[in-house]
Image (cartoon, helix red, strand yellow):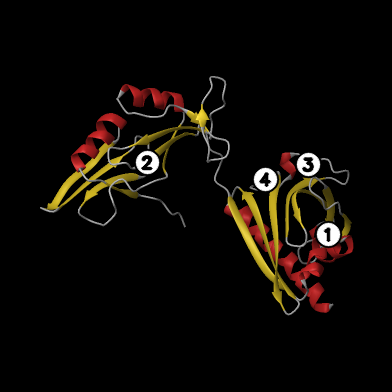
Amino acid sequence: MQWTLEVVRIPVADVDRAKEFYVERVGFAVDFDVRPDEGHRFVQLTPPGSGCSIQLAAGYDDMAPGSLRGLVLVVPDIRAAHAQLSERGVETGGVVVTRDGITYRPAHDDDALDNVGFVHVTDPDGNQWAVQQISSRGPATFDLAVTRVLDAPIEDAWTAWTDPDRVKSWWGPTGFIAPLAEMDVREGGTSLVCMRAPAEYGGQDLYNTWTYREVVRPKRLVFDLGFTDAARAQLPAESIPPGVPRSVRHEVALRPLGGGRTEVTVREFGYLTTEARDVSRAGLEQCLEKMVAVFRAG
């Protein structure tokens, strides 16, 4: 299901003054300006190219004029946007750059500004906007999460992801076996795992690498799963299923529940289609069911 942000209400004290600022100086388009009765007025405006509008409303709620913070407009060229605002008499602090989202410094001529270049604007009531440069966006992705409970304390549950024999006991969907698990579980390390398809599916060996971003024993693992051959060489793009990225980020979280049990949640990120995500979810669920069975059997 798609969820679309449609309207943001801007609390203002003087609708005419605010309308003049947003339309004449910033360049928003007027959608409508209506007075349903003596005490109320709606003005809806839309930024050029935006799918979301703002409403300047007086008399409808108790939001204090000027109380909004954190509103963000996105433009492909922040320097051009700054020049346009300046030409129209809008005061700003100039083009600034941030590396942490908290502190800012004036932009230099040689700065790369995509995602980190901003201009800050305050309307006549004190509502604060940030204009951010984003020249291009990556494709929408589809992520997944699966949770299971293991009959094992957290230290034992950790071995399911780090001990070669444990990994081989559950890696691969139903009917697959895992003949190989070369584990190098450390930040920057790379493990190699193999799953073997059943004969009816061709019986081939499928290799993956897990390259670790974070290792927090015994609670958390973050790794990038890659598609390789037995020598760890990356497979060509045409050998990877449609909609699956060449590297799939995985986050594994272990949480003790008491009574010698552990909750394991696995998240996978970056699938380009719902079909690819759903196939991967089904495979992950089967893997984790095998993991549950291993610990249940003792």
Can residue 205 be seen here?
no
- The residues tagged by marks 2 and 4 sit, at their Cα atoms, a distance apart of 38 Å
Element under label 3?
loop
Q: Position of residue 281 (x, y in %)?
A: 65, 60
Of marks 1 and 2, the one in the foreground = 2
Tag 2: residue type? Gln
Residue at the image position 77 percent from the left and 62 percent from the top: 218
- The residues tagged by marks 2 and 3 sit, at their Cα atoms, a distance apart of 48 Å
Report the residue marked by disc 3.
235
152 and 224: which is toward the camera: 152
Q: Which mark is residue 174?
A: none
Q: Residue furthest toward the bottom?
A: 259
Q: Earlier in the sequence, mark 2 or mark 4?
A: 2
Horizontal placement of 139 versus 195: left or right?
Answer: left
* Vertical comparison of 75 with 161: above or below: above
Q: Earlier in the sequence, mark 3 or mark 1?
A: 1
Q: Earlier in the sequence, mark 2 or mark 3?
A: 2
- The residues tagged by marks 3 and 1 sit, at their Cα atoms, a distance apart of 24 Å
Q: Residues within 10 Å of mark 1 (few under 14, many from 20)?
A: some
Element under label 4?
loop
Tag 3: residue type? Leu
Report the residue marked by disc 1.
162
Element under label 1?
helix
Tag 4: residue type? Pro
Q: Earlier in the sequence, mark 3 or mark 4?
A: 3
Q: Earlier in the sequence, mark 1 or mark 2?
A: 2
Number of disc labels: 4
3 and 279: which is toward the camera: 3
* Vertical comparison of 45 with 112: above or below: below
- The residues tagged by marks 4 and 1 sit, at their Cα atoms, a distance apart of 24 Å
Of marks 2 and 4, the one in the foreground = 2
Report the residue marked by disc 4.
245
